[in-house]
Amino acid sequence: MPKKSKRYQTTITIKPLETPDFESLLQLLFRGTKNPDLPEHALKFLKGLRSAGENGRFERAKWEEYCTANNISKTTYYTMINKLIGLGLIEVVERDFYKLSNRSERFFEAIILSIRAFMSKKGQTPQTSV
C-alpha cells in the first residue's frame, strides 16, 4: 500500500459538547492557533464556496487578493487552508482550485458506524482461539 502524504494532516481536539454544531467543530479545529479569528475566517471561506453552488471553486492563485480583501496574513490564510484540507472540508482539484469536499463527512460517518458496532457488542465476551 503506498504511503499517503502527511502534508495535509491535522489534529482536532475532541471533547463532549453540549450543543455540537459546525461552528464548534471549527473552534476545535483551530484551537491553539495564534489567531483566535481563524474559525470565523474559515466559516466565511467555506460559506463562499458553498454559495457558489456544486461547482463552486476558489482559484488558488488568488490567495493574495483574498488576504487583502479579508485583512489576513499569508500565514493565517495557509493555516486556515491546510487545516480545512486536513479535516477534509475542502480539497484541491485540477491543482489550481479549492472546492468543498465530503471527505470529512465520510470519515465521521465511518467513525459513528464503528462506535455503534463496538457499543452493540456490550456484554459479549471475546472469543479466544485455541
Image (tube, rainbow, N blue to C red):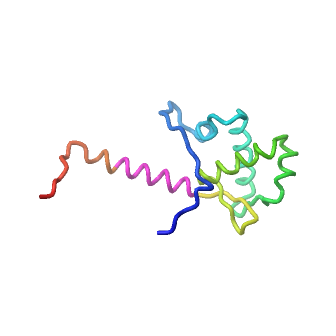
Per the rendered image, the range of residues in magenta is: 103-116
Residue 35 appears left or right of 70: left
Residue 45 appears left or right of 4: right
Name the quadrant of the C terminus: bottom left
Q: Position of residue 27 (x, y in %)?
A: 62, 36
Q: Is residue 113 magenta?
A: yes
Which residue is at the far left? 130
Numbered circles on residues, count: 0
Residue 127 appears left or right of 1: left
Q: Position of residue 10 (x, y in %)?
A: 58, 48
Q: Is residue 26 above or below residue 93?
A: above
Q: Position of residue 96 (x, y in %)?
A: 76, 65
Out of 57 and 95, give the one closest to the viewer: 95
Name the residue rendered at 81%, 41% in the picture: 72
Name the residue rendered at 57%, 39% in the picture: 21
Query: Which quadrant holds residue 128?
Result: bottom left
Q: Is residue 22 above or below residue 109?
A: above
Out of 47 and 108, give the one closest to the viewer: 108
Report the magenta stretch's main SS: helix
Q: Is residue 68 magenta?
A: no
Q: Position of residue 82 (x, y in %)?
A: 67, 51
Name the residue rendered at 62%, 35% in the picture: 31
Residue 7 appears left or right of 120: right
